[in-house]
Amino acid sequence: MASIIETKFGTWRATIKRKGTKPQYKVFKRKTDAEVWARNIEGAIDRGEHRPAAKGERITFDELVNLFLTDKDHGLPTHSINQQKLVPGKLKFWRQEFGFAILRDITPELIDEATERLQKKRIISTAGNDRGQISPSTVRTLLGNLGTVFRYAVTKRFIRETPMRQIHTKPEANDERVRILTDDERVRLLAACDISQTPELPVAVRLALNTGLRKSELFGLTQDRVNITERSKRYQSDGLPFVIPPRHILVEITKNGHPRLMPLNDEALDALAGWMRTHPIDAKTLVFPSRETPRKPLDIDRPWETALRRAEITDFRWHDMRHCFASELIMSGANVAQVAKLTGHRDLKSLMRYSHLSPEHSHELVARISRQIQVRNGEQK
């Protein structure tokens, strides 16, 4: 029999204690409500239909994400520092869609409906320009981020199974897009950057075109990881020593967490050296710091878009300069492994998109087979 007592606050507390079940209680404003609740719960227990609320029935998606982002053991430490900073932003859409919902109520159907809305979203730049519809590749990435959070919920036993297991239809991602500047476009782009009111732009663009650095790597670069001299330079990070050769930069914070050394050609060296000579600041400072908050990198989006309009270049993104760099390497005779070492690609598959750019090199490889056969035939005779 349930125990129903009046509290000192004038409310009624109903308590149910049954052998083999967890004690339960609830507070009501009226005694009759407490009695109805107690009868319903006891009846459900007698019929074997009642079970205590699981964790997932008490925690919302918003609360789950907060736990995920603050839990040091959830797996994010395996990512680079820059990647960790991006995670909250990548979960923003899902929090807007069902952050209020309790985990057990987030069904595959609810996720499918949210994904349909996501695919129709358009990307608006900080300058207010419409950059077009969100790409299938980005949609797949955001679904992957959502799946990571749900897997975390399973490990914490908030839910028994992730609803993502029933999400079988994902947009096909076309990762073969390679937009490369023509020689004329390159000249026009650099000329437009040179007359920009943002003096960092021409330097940053020349570095991007000649090093293939990701945007986050370039604007996360600090002066102590730059060696524009003709002598080797020592650098220490978290107790680990590095030697930066002459005319090199150390890309320490990368997408995949693996640091790499990047040589500077004449164009990149001249641009970077000129900038650092005219802007001498503390060694730990970013090469391109924000004017308002020097600890943060400069926001280059608006001057970049202005330069593209002046140069009359369309369908070209900042990341495409990385494609330009890799393409130039391939066309100069570098093999895929050499390109991967310089660009920091861990997966060689992503570099195969450039294979068509080296037909002469491929022809030479095939020609070697004929020559080898002729040599062996000659030996046999």
Image (cartoon, helix red, strand yellow):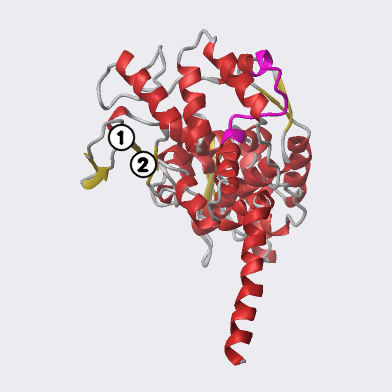
Q: Nearer the viewer, residue 254 or 274?
A: 274
Does the magenta segment cover residue 320? yes
The secondary structure that most of the magenta stretch takes on is loop
| Image spot of residue 151 (x, y percent) | 56, 55
Q: Which residues are magenta?
A: 308-321
The reply to whether residue 39 is in sight is no
Is 215 located above or below residue 176 in the figure? above
In the image, is 378 to the left or to the right of 173? left
Mark found first going from the N terminus, 2 or 1: 1
The x, y position of residue 324, in whole percent, is 60, 37
Residue at 62% of width from left, 64% of height from top? 365
Looking at this view, is 366 or 35 the one in front?
366
Badge 2 crowding class, 10 Å Cα cut-off, few under 14, some 14 to 19, many 20 or more, is some
Name the residue tied to disc 2.
252
| Residue at the image position 61 percent from the left and 59 percent from the top | 51
The residue located at (76%, 48%) in the rendering is 171
Badge 1 amino acid: Arg
**Disc 2 to disc 1: CB gap under 8 Å:** yes
Q: What amino acid is labelled 2 in the image?
A: Glu
Q: Nearer the viewer, mark 2 or mark 1?
A: 1
| Picture coordinates of residue 208, whole percent (x, y) | 50, 31
User: In the depicted view, which residue is nearer to us: 224 or 165?
Assistant: 224
* Residue on which the image places disc 1: 225
